[in-house]
Image (tube, rainbow, N blue to C red):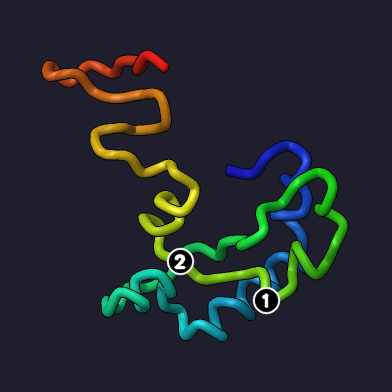
Amino acid sequence: MAKPFSDAFYHSKAWGRAREDALKRDSYLCQRCLAGGEITPATMVHHIEELTPANIDNPDITCGLDNLVSLCDLCHKKTHGWARAGATRQGLAFDADGNLICLAE
């Protein structure tokens, strides 16, 4: 999910072009899965150096192919730490009855 400082960037033509260029370069395959010997379609393009308010105007960071890698949804979530066993989002989980609960930190 885009953060407020990067929302406009992710709706820009520059990002659309860079995203498509990264997917083409990576043959539309998840590079993390591919490194593990699996063939999985890529649905996301990940910034290796994460975008911050300090670098959002740096085209080498935002659109440079050296800073982009194609990933599947699950690998993108794992890369960000969003995919955890039994959790829907960081800090949330389902109890034995299927109720959504907050995990104690």
Q: How far apart are marks 1 and 2 (CA)?
A: 14 Å
Secondary structure under the numbered disc 2 in the rendered image: strand
In the image, residue 47 above or below residue 29: above
**In the foreground, 103 or 71:** 103
The tag on residue 11 is none
Residue 56 placement, left or right of 75: right
Residue 81 x, y percent position in the rendering = 44, 44
Residue 14 placement, left or right of 69: right
Q: Image point 76% across, 64% down: which residue?
A: 61
The tag on residue 66 is 1
Q: Image point 46% across, 54% down: which residue?
A: 79
Which quarter of the figure has residue 95?
top left
Residue 51 x, y percent position in the rendering = 71, 52
Labels 1 and 2: the sequence-earlier one: 1
Amino acid type at mark 1: Asp
Residue found at the far left of this picture = 96
Considering the image in quadrants, where does the C terminus appear? top left
Residue 64 x, y percent position in the rendering = 74, 73
Secondary structure under the numbered disc 1 in the rendered image: helix
Residue 86 x, y percent position in the rendering = 24, 34
Amino acid type at mark 2: Leu
Which quarter of the figure has residue 12?
bottom right
Location of mark 2 (residue): 71
Considering the image in quadrants, where does the N terminus appear? top right
Q: Are marks 1 and 2 in contact (CB under 8 Å)?
A: no
**In the foreground, 89 or 17:** 89
Q: Image point 41% across, 77% down: which residue?
A: 29
In the image, residue 85 above or below residue 57: above
* Number of numbered discs: 2
